[in-house]
Image (cartoon, grey):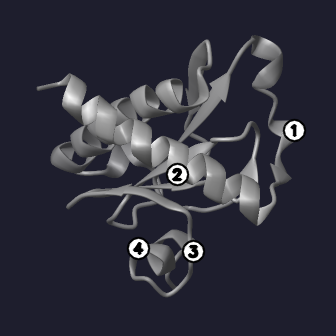
Amino acid sequence: MSSIFTKIINNELPAYKLYEDEHTIAILALNQIQLGHTLVISKREENHFFDLEDLEYQALMATTKKMAQALKKATNCNRVCTFFQGFEVQHAHHHLVPTQSAADFNLSMQTQRSTEDMKFIQNKIVEALKNVAKDKT
């Protein structure tokens, strides 16, 4: 049975998409620890990130870096904290959480945000992502 992420990748379920390439997709987490909480997901369904092929793992980390840079610009946070968990969805994915302090990085703070909040931060991150790409040229 396909994971929820595979269904999102296959456009069977909606998501707040931020970025997509050949090997990865980045979306907003439905339950936000902090507004902007992003998931970077391998397109190939694999339970553990360390079981990805090297190219897939490298692509996951490259997208993670790109998305962290965009999150920092979009949210003006002090730090983008990251973690791999994988208990809720057994499909390799990396969490990125914009934070101002260690207190902001608390999993018990997960909450669903309004559609307006999600679209607002989605647009800010996508716009910041364009600037990240320009900064590299």
Judging depth in this view, the residue of 14 and 53 nearest the camera is 14
Provide the secondary structure element on which disc 2 rests: helix
Judging depth in this view, the residue of 123 and 55 nearest the camera is 123
**Residue corresponding to mark 1:** 109
Residue 37 visible in the snapshot = yes
Label placed on residue 12: none
The answer for how far apart the CA atoms under marks 2 and 4 are is: 20 Å
- Kind of residue sitting beneath label 4: Ile
Percent x, y for residue 132? Answer: 30, 30
Residue at (28, 43) in percent of width and height:
57
- Kind of residue sitting beneath label 3: Ile
The answer for how far apart the CA atoms under marks 2 and 3 are is: 23 Å
Percent x, y for residue 11? Answer: 44, 83
**Residue corresponding to mark 2:** 123
**Residue corresponding to mark 3:** 4
Report the side of 82 relative to 128 (left or right): right
Contact between marks 1 and 4 (CB within 8 A): the answer is no
Report the side of 111 relative to 64 (left or right): right
Provide the secondary structure element on which disc 4 rests: helix
